[in-house]
Amino acid sequence: MRARRPGPWCLPFLFVIAVASGCYVARDAPSIPVRDGGLALDAAPPATLDASMPARDSGPRRDAGALTCDGPLPPFEGPGCRSETFECLGECTSADCSDACLAADPGCGRCLNDALVRCANPLGCQADWSVFACCAVESGACPGRSGIDLILCGASECPAELETLGTCVTEVLDMSPECEANATEACAP
């Protein structure tokens, strides 16, 4: 049986996963010693300070939550595809043609990338997504970005991780044609 190849509109997504949610960056704050207002020791500074480390008051400590890069993509926020874009993609026979169609509708590329990765992750690509997403976030190249937008900002910082993710998504698309159908449906006008 011949393996089914993804349609030409998919090709650009598999290598950049092509045009463009992941990691939530936060860290647990250190615990604050309990001060009950009792003995005079409660008013003293913590015993771990010494003369070589000046005390700094940065205000009250806040718990920013746990650092996680291995969760599912956050909900996609953005436009889908215009009907003209799907018509254009349907007529393409090359990646260059697909690129030209998507260049005219940038939100479509983000939506299709999100739908393809979202479908591929539970079918075996979640670990590869997590490695790439954490690399992108930890590189510092993606401040304030999450989810599928990490592909845009993290591609140059984490090319090996992105290539591994792209390979996984390609393999899933070869075995699971429903991912392509789901992407088309999720991004349809």
Image (spheres, grey):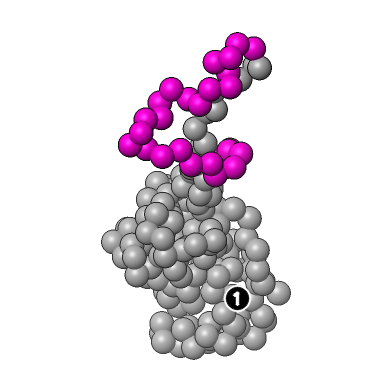
- Taking the magenta stretch, the answer to whether it contains residue 154 is no
Main SS, magenta region, reads loop
> Residue 21 location in percent, x, y?
55, 57
Q: Vertical placement of 53 versus 43: above or below?
A: below
Of 44 and 7, which appears nearest the observer?
Answer: 44
Quadrant of the image for the C terminus? bottom right
Q: Vertical placement of 113 versus 93: above or below?
A: above
What is the secondary structure assignment of the residue under circle 1? helix
Q: Is residue 11 left or right of residue 105?
A: left
Instruction: Answer whether residue 37 is visible to the viewer in this image.
Output: yes
Residue at label 1?
107
> Residue 62 location in percent, x, y?
60, 39
List the single residue furthest toward the right.
189
Identify the magenta region: 38-66
Q: Vertical placement of 183 versus 55: above or below?
A: below
Counting other residues with Cα less than 10 Å from the Cα at mark 1, is it few (<14), some (14-19), or many (20 or more)? some
At label 1, which amino acid type do we have? Gly
> Residue 134 location in percent, x, y?
41, 52
Instruction: Answer whether residue 17 is visible to the viewer in this image.
Output: no
Q: Quadrant of residue 49?
A: top left
Q: Vertical placement of 169 versus 127: above or below?
A: below
- Taking the magenta stretch, the answer to whether it contains residue 62 is yes
Residue at x 40% of width, y 26% of height:
48
Q: Is residue 81 left or right of residue 90?
A: right
Residue at x 49% of width, y 62% of height:
143
